[in-house]
Image: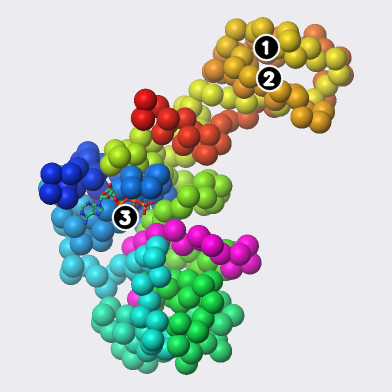
Amino acid sequence: MLEVKNAKIMYGDFVAVKDLSFTIKPGDIFGLLGTNGAGKTTTFRMIMGLLEPTEGEVLYFGEKIGYHNVDEVGYMIEERSLLTKLTVKELMLFHGRLKSLKKEVIIERLEYWLERFGVSEYKDKKIKELSKGNQQKIQFITALLNEPKLLILDEPFAGLDPINTVLFVDAIRDFQKKGSMVVFSSHQLDHVESFCEEVVVLEKGEAIINGNIEKIKDDFQKRNIKIIGDNIDLKKLKSIDGVIEVKKEKEIVYVKIENNDVANDVFDYVKTCDNIIKYDVEKASLSEIFVAKVGEARG
Ligand code: ATP
């Protein structure tokens, strides 16, 4: 269990994160989102015990997190900070030893992951000779090597093709099944939506969205309605109080409404139309909520 309680981080006079609270339980996949400079990396450093909050605290299974927990943490950073003159094997020995692993264990795990990611032939190749995507796999393996209980992944999917994305997703799911806590950041909100149950969205160091994704979507009032049918009068739909936008693409009419109550008024009208094949009230996507909340926070 990882608990962040009312944490604040300052760089000199600058407040990078303020009053941040969240909890991650074993087996959780947790999304940490935000626009550039919002405070994600700072938060990652804090939950690894590399930055100490000036206010609040970070508890790892009830005790203050610190460097002594390093053997249980895996961190994949966003930039490729690999020592590119080393071979893959040399790099793993370097990282594995930092995490107190024995040489045989490092080699055994490295071979397992290289095979699983389909890159066994690169074991003795220099990092700089590898393609970007393959360097990313190596970076990912450095984070997995110690079978971390807390796995922190900064933009793990950036630039990956769909096949390799699936390989990463499966590996992360395996760690989840073993009870690891996985925290990752991504600008691809569809990934976050399909992957995490809990999210925090930071904007200028403050959490503007925090909690269970489904609940956040339920609470977010903006709704989209999809209608397919004959003789739907778009002007009439537009004139209903609380309807924000009406548009028709191919045979589907999309209606954006302010809140759930408006859905009833739209439905009352739709009932008077002929041959309605579809009437669906959809929740806003995480991406829509993200854009709206960041917009609100920026005024
Ligand atoms: P990105 O998505 O661009 O990687 P981020 O959400 O990870 O951004 P952080 O790197 O945590 O953001 O930075 C948060 C804020 O803190 C930014 O305004 C940044 O300029 C500032 N900052 C980060 N590191 C330092 C530092 N060492 N000293 C001073 N300010 C810093």
Which residue has dot 3 on it? 41
Query: Disc 3 and disc 2: Cα gap in Å?
Result: 40 Å
* Residue located at (77% from left, 29% from top): 249
State which tag comes first along the sequence, 1 or 3. 3
- 149 falls in the magenta region: yes
The amino acid sitting under disc 3 is Thr
Q: Where on the picture, by quarter, is residue 175?
A: bottom left
Which residue has dot 1 on it? 238
- On the picture, is 238 further left or further right than 89? right
**What is the quadrant of the C terminus in the image?**
top left
| Image location (x, y in percent) of residue 179 | 40, 62
Residue 20 in the image: above or below residue 235: below
Residue 3 in the image: above or below residue 115: above
| CB at disc 2 and ligand 1 closer than 8 Å | no
The amino acid sitting under disc 1 is Lys
Q: How many marks?
A: 3
* Residue located at (50% from left, 84% from top): 129
**Numbered mark located on residue 246 in the image:** 2
Label 2 neighbour load within 10 Å: few <14, some 14-19, many 20+: some
Residue 15 in the image: above or below residue 62: above
Labels 2 and 1 touching (C-beta < 8 A)? yes
Does residue 84 appear anywhere in the picture? yes
